[in-house]
Amino acid sequence: MSNRSNQQSETKPESKTNSKAKTDKPSIVNVAVAVIHYKDQYLLGFRDATQHQGNRYEFVGGKIEADESAAQALIREVAEETGILLDNNTVVKLGRLHHDYGDKQVSLQVYKIELTAEQYEQHRHREQGLEGQALTWVSKLQLLAGAYHLPAANKTILEWLKLPSNIAITYPLAHFNTHTDAAAWLQYHQENLASESWVYIRLKDANSKHLAEQLMTARPDILTILPNDNEQPLNVEESLTANETETGQRIIAKHLTHSTLMQCFNEVGSSTALTQSLSKDYPLIVSCHDIASITAANKLASMRIQNALPPVIGTFVSPVLATQTHPDDTPLGWEAWSALVELADMPVIGLGGLEPAMLNQALQYGGISVAGIRHFI
């Protein structure tokens, strides 16, 4: 994780007009947010009624000072507020958010930290923080269900927290003898996908779109990521009952390929008509390979939040390592991959030559999850 530089520029006398204009617009408060958990138990504080966004629960954190990085601020604030020392814990970036409350603008740099069993036992029974605020541990299920009233800026964070530790991607049809062996493809995935797993159903053959519907019907327990409608229209929603579609138990997100993502913006970075046609019913997961696509993903994420649309909940950044499916692609390697991770404003999923056992390595380099085909099914 890289530290941000904080260089102060020379200040010059301002006219009264400029000074007044600046006071009319609230300054941006940079905040480090710590999503602290032990397994499926998450730590929340409670804001006093006299505070901004009072009478709400919140993740622990506070203002980033001019002489410190976001990670340094996070470690300091958590120690000051709760007494929990995070110096030796793995601090993983979830993302960055900007939120305008009208009377106050905040820029949140959000990190996820898992406590050790010893840390959890030491702090689990404390009902009050070091600054007198109420503290409580809540289950992930209750948290994601909205049982605790959090400030509006936290809505996207809750969507990020839904990401699992690993995501399976379906094999291409070509893996099963011939391009037309749909029955073998369907049977294999029906029998081998893990229960309740997240699955990106990636079928590039335009004539095989019906297979996604058949797999989802055969395995109603899996949570699916489907291609965005303009890339590969599917009639899956029409075949599901209203209850299944509304509860989101079948389709968890839509996916944008790298090429489609880049088509969302023109040469000068302005959005195109394609951006408006993206799914407005589901969160998005995008594929990125370089700085340009990470920049595009950040723009798209910001636009969707500003327009109150389901957020970009993650990005596949690849290839981390060499892969059998794309042997000619030059892998990034962990160090270069980590540099791209740091630029992303949303959680990063490692992809390319990985296996579930590499999750801890991905966490060490700033990712939140891993994905793949052959080692994940």
Image: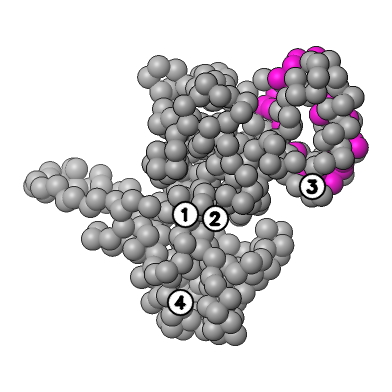
Asked if 271 appears above or below 154 in the picture, the reply is above
Q: How far apart are marks 1 and 4 (CA)?
A: 20 Å
Residue at image position (47%, 54%) is: 364
Disc on res. 364:
1
Q: What residue type is labelled 4?
A: Ile
Side of 215 relative to 300 (left or right): right
Q: Which of marks 2 and 3 is nearer the N terminus?
A: 3
Q: Earlier in the sequence, mark 4 or mark 2?
A: 4
**Disc 3 or 1, which lies upstream in sequence?**
3
Helix, strand or loop under label 1: helix
| 340 vs 278: above or below | below
Discs 4/3, front: 3
Which mark, residue 194? Answer: 3
Q: Can residue 293 be seen from the camera position used here?
A: no
What residue appears at the point 50 percent right and 37 percent down from the top-left corner?
320
| SS assignment at label 2 | helix
Q: Give the range drawn in magenta.
A: 203-229
Is residue 296 covered in magenta? Answer: no
The residue at which mark 2 appears reads as 360
The answer to whether marks 1 and 2 mark residues whose Cβ atoms lie closer than 8 Å is yes
Secondary structure type for disc 3: loop
**Residue underneath mark 4:** 84
